[in-house]
Amino acid sequence: MVLGMFLARCRRYRVGMTTLSSTTTVGLFGIGLDTYWPQFPGLKDELLGYQQRIATRLAKPGVRVEDVGLVDSPDAARVAGARLRAAGCEIVFLYISTYALSSTVLPVVQAIGRPVVVLNLQPTPAMDYAAINALGDRGAMTGAWLANCQACSVPEVANVFRRSGLPFQVVTGHLDEACAWTAIDSWVTAARVRSQLAATRVGMLGRYYGGMLDVYSDITRLAARFGCHHEMLEMDEVVALRRDLSAAAVADARHRLETTFRIDPSCEPMEVDRAARTAAALSALVERHRLGALCYYHEGVTGDPGQDVVTSLIPGLTLLTAEGIPCAGEYEAKNVIAMKILDLAKTGGSFSEFYGLDLTDDVVLLGHDGPGHPRIAQEQVSLVPLPLYHGKPGKGLSIQMRVRHGAATALAVVQGPADQDELLVAEGEAVAGPTLAIGNTNSRYRFPCGARNFIDRWSARGPSHHCAIATGHQGAWLRRLADLTGLGYTSI
């Protein structure tokens, strides 16, 4: 009951607080040859039926399909290209329905200016040779073959795209093949995340943690790669919002804390009240600036109202993270992008760093102080008191959680030398076992290459010391996202 209420609030919050479009448009066009239609009656209708099956499978919640039909001549290609461009497609799927001239394809792709995925999907795993041969009439037999000869045009189309400098990818299989649709769905997910990421306003509250040179980010490069906007914010604004809160806003925040967390009995009521007020102020900040993510850090000085805020941030930031506004500490702008990427795919994105190695059990410990991601927790997140924030000023409340056991993915956005930015990905498993109860996120992960090899290979790519954690194996669509954004991709 409590969980249902919490998730319902998350859905309302995601709609009300962000500027992200709920729908991503993907384009679809088929190609054929108009010469065939009078020669082989019924062929075009059969191919259009296959294309409709593709359109139906592409359409899912949050995805609108702009299907411009079967393009079979250069003139039709120009019309289709204009329609797809006007529709604002994030990605376009080109279905090869039968042999088609490359002069029919090129004008469409030149017009749309979007990534193209060529679908080499035949109707069945193999032709029914006996049934086709039994038709007797060679014209009918040829028509039946043409409904199955999708592969015929793939090299021609690929040749023309490559010589024209047009990027493309190919998915080969048959219409009902699970692995082919897994590949197609990965492209759709990547396109959807890319479009929503470009609409994200990232709040940058405070300043960097001094001396963490790896954390310092090139914001211009992040904006250029992902299209997101970065809003520079002052802690003074949170102080002012917190001062002017209504009683109803504070009560609502207190209710959210009580329904989201298991509040440890040792938490002082005064500290819970302080955290509730700050949580309400953070919600107001997010609403005012229409934020979709937030990175932060502040120290202040003794007696500074900002220090009173920053020492009570963690519960409210964890609520925001659960509600689709991921929050990263230490002003880690690169990592909050990684967190947002995973959150947009509804797979998590919890703030993490290396906590140690258990070489006896061959696992890596990852966690972090600060906000976690309750929607991917193994059990209800605990709210606990900390007598001090290690390496940071003050004391207050913190959260304690483990990431859900099972398949897991680590993601880092890496800014390398010059133009060598990449997504760094590792797929492994969150496993049961002992962790430290120190008021942080803390989990154990096993990777196929082993703990020693994992940390050596991961570190060799030059990420910052932070990463984002998701549940499930997410590498397939993350690789596609790297393709769509022009980033490199490394899988450990």
Image (tube, rainbow, N blue to C red):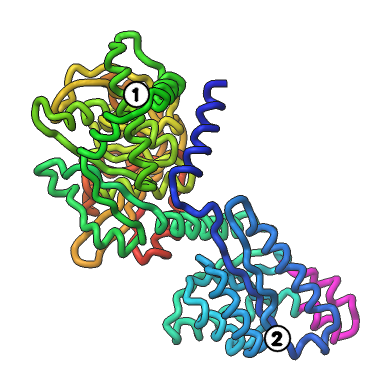
- Residue to which mark 2 is pinned: 33
Secondary element under disc 2, as helix, strand or loop, is loop
The quadrant in which residue 208 appears is top left
User: Does the segment drawn in magenta span residue 114?
Assistant: no
Position in image of residue 211 (x %, y %)? 9, 43
Estimate how packed mark 2 is, as few (under 14), some (14 to 19) or many (20 or more) residues with alpha carbons within 10 Å. Answer: some
User: Decide: marks 1, 2 in contact (CB < 8 A)?
Assistant: no
User: Distance from label 1 to label 2 (Cα)?
Assistant: 66 Å
Point out the frontmost of discs 1 and 2. 1
Q: Nearer the viewer, residue 473 or 92?
A: 92
Q: State the image coordinates of residue 285 (x, y, percent, origin top left).
A: 33, 40
**Residue occupying the point 24% across, 32% down:** 355
Measuring from the top left, give residue 397's x and y in whole percent: 27, 21
Between 313 and 53, the one lying in front of the other is 313
Q: In the rendered image, which residue does mark 1 sit on?
A: 276
* Residue 261, disc: none
Vertical arrangement, residue 492 with respect to residue 256, above or below: below
